Image: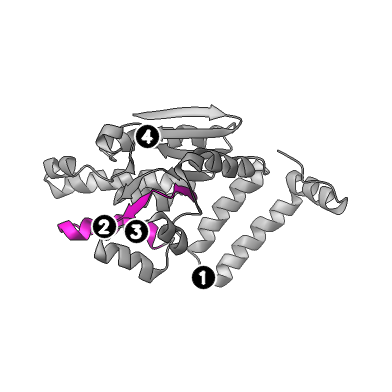
């Protein structure tokens, strides 16, 4: 269901239910949650790549599963499970990069938006089609609204129409778009660039970035000032400053 591979500080998690379009069933959500929880305590992991096998990155929730739950409280429990998993991504100290090879729909699109970064094949597609079927993609809207401009996010949510990878790049949903045959290498290259940075400061910087996004400007600067001050005072920062002043290459970590 979920494959895990580690190499030189980069952990790749691959959703492996291609026949089910990697639907975010309760089982898949549980597998992802367990993987993120394990990674959170693993200092060997510097960067996480979230990938998928098959034609779809993820087609979102399993509508058959939701329909079978029937009771609103049980359905709410499933979405609470999903929301917890999504928030685990931003809570991780390690940056998470989505490697999108195919369609990312509904909660699958949410998953891409929730990751810190995303690299997509030019054949990838993105959509939040719930409105068409009478169940508005409200939870995907949380992640989309924090990545895209409000009007772009609402356009996806209100129309349910599909956008291609180039549009996703233009709108800010993904960072890079490459031919399918280059997707793995390009994602690996981005992950390696980040993995070579000082890990303590990378973690602190990621945490501060998300914290300040929920604050007013004054409080955001107060928080960020404390974090950057600690960064310069930390051993990693001092080593980096020495290299900068001595016109040497930045130290690898």
Label 1's element? loop
> Going by the image, does 12 lie left or right of 239?
left
In percent of width and height, residue 104 lies at 34, 48
219 w.r.t. 198: above or below = below
Q: Which residues are magenta?
A: 117-145
For disc 3, the marked residue is 163
Label 3's element? strand
Q: Of tags 3 and 1, which is closer to the observer?
A: 3
For disc 2, the marked residue is 137
In percent of width and height, residue 113 lies at 41, 53
Residue shown at 68% from the left, 43% from the top: 198
First along the sequence among labels 4 and 2: 4
State the CA–CA distance, disc 2 to disc 3.
16 Å
In percent of width and height, residue 47 lies at 55, 39
Q: Of tags 1 and 4, which is closer to the observer?
A: 4
Q: Of tags 2 and 3, which is closer to the observer?
A: 3
Judge whether residue 32 is colored magenta.
no
């Amino acid at each position: 269901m979920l494959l895990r591979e580690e190499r030189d500080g980069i952990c790749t998690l691959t959703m492996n239910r291609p026949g089910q379009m990697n639907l975010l069933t309760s089982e898949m959500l549980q597998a992802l949650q367990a993987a993120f929880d394990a990674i959170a305590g693993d200092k060997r992991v510097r960067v996480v790549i979230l990938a998928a096998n098959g034609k779809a990155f993820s087609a979102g929730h399993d509508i058959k599963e939701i329909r079978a739950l029937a009771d609103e409280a049980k359905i709410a429990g499933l979405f609470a499970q999903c929301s917890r998993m999504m928030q685990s991504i931003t809570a991780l100290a390690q940056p998470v990069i989505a490697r999108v090879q195919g369609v990312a729909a509904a909660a699958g699109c949410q998953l891409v938006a929730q990751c810190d970064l995303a690299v997509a094949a030019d054949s990838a597609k993105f959509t939040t089609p719930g409105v068409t079927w009478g169940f508005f993609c409200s939870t995907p809207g949380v992640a989309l609204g924090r990545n895209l401009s409000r009007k772009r996010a609402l356009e996806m949510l209100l129309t349910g129409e599909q956008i291609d990878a180039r549009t996703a790049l233009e709108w800010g949903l993904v960072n890079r778009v490459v031919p399918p045959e280059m997707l793995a290498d390009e994602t690996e290259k981005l992950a390696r660039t980040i993995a070579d940075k000082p890990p303590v400061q990378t973690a602190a910087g990621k945490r501060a970035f998300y914290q300040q996004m929920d604050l007013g400007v004054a409080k955001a600067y107060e928080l960020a000032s404390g974090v950057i001050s600690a960064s310069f005072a930390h051993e990693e920062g001092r080593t980096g400053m020495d290299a900068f002043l001595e016109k040497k290459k930045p130290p690898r970590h």
